[in-house]
Amino acid sequence: MGGNQSVPKITAQDRAILESRDKIKQYQKKIQGILEREHEIAKQHLAAGHKDRALFALRKRKYQESLLVKTDGQLENLEKLVSTIEFSLIEVSVLHGLQQGNEVLKEIHKEMNLESVEKLLEETQEAREYQREIDETLTNSLTVEEEEAVQVELQVLQREATGEQTQPPIELPSVPSREPVAAVPEGAAEAGPREREPVAA
């Protein structure tokens, strides 16, 4: 599926551009050294009273400066080329990835065409109908007591799966809704209410 395709690499032309950029940078460093040296030479000639030689050194320095300006322009152009190369490599990599993805999609579509999907749906429907027929046959062949036992066993399995207790809960007596009547001592009801004794004056 295109997995053997090579990743895009830098061509010989691209490598030559990169080498040219490096050479220009090295040349610029060399010119910078010449500029500093000619400046020192001009100062020395002026100190020695040789104005003409100092002027010649300064002219040479100015010429080197013009070369440096030109190399700056060349370096700028090469930098643009390098940026273009890098961007082109990115574009090629993206295109390469898109091509691989497109091939993978094509393979998937080959494996999952419309006929395969329809066939899978038909087989699934047939399996459901077959399962329903088996369920109906089993249900009709059991007695009422056997079916109830199956339902109880199913409930037990469901409780075990959810972690509930399998034992039936203990039923406690219900709490009375009214307060209990206080116990009356024996003989108290027969005696009736006592008469109050007269209070001594």
Image (spheres, helix red, strand yellow):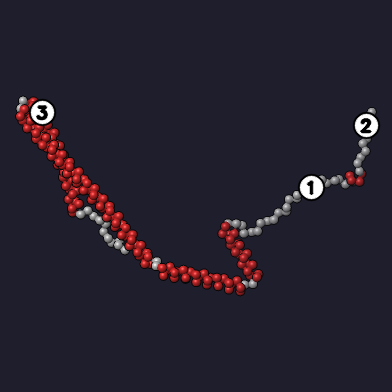
Q: Residues within 10 Å of mark 1 (few under 14, many from 20)?
A: few
Q: Amino acid at mark 1?
A: Pro
Residue placed under numbered mark 1 in the picture: 180
**Residue depicted at x 18% and y 54%:** 12
Picture quarter containing residue 170? bottom right
Viewport quadrant of the N terminus: bottom left
Q: Amino acid at mark 2?
A: Val
**Residue depicted at x 64% and y 67%:** 148
For label 2, the SS is loop
Nearer to the camera, 56 or 159 = 56
Picture quarter containing residue 43? top left
Q: Amino acid at mark 3?
A: Lys
Viewport quadrant of the C terminus: top right
**Residue depicted at x 35% and y 64%:** 106
Against 111, residue 177 (above or below) is above
Nearer to the camera, 166 or 53 = 53
Picture quarter containing residue 60? top left
For label 3, the SS is helix
User: In 3D space, how far apart are the residues under numbered discs 2 and 3 (Cα atoms)?
Assistant: 146 Å
Mark yes or no: residue 71 visible.
yes
x and y percentages locating residue 178 in the rendered image: 77, 48
Nearer to the camera, 140 or 93 = 93
Mark earlier in primary sequence (1, 2): 1
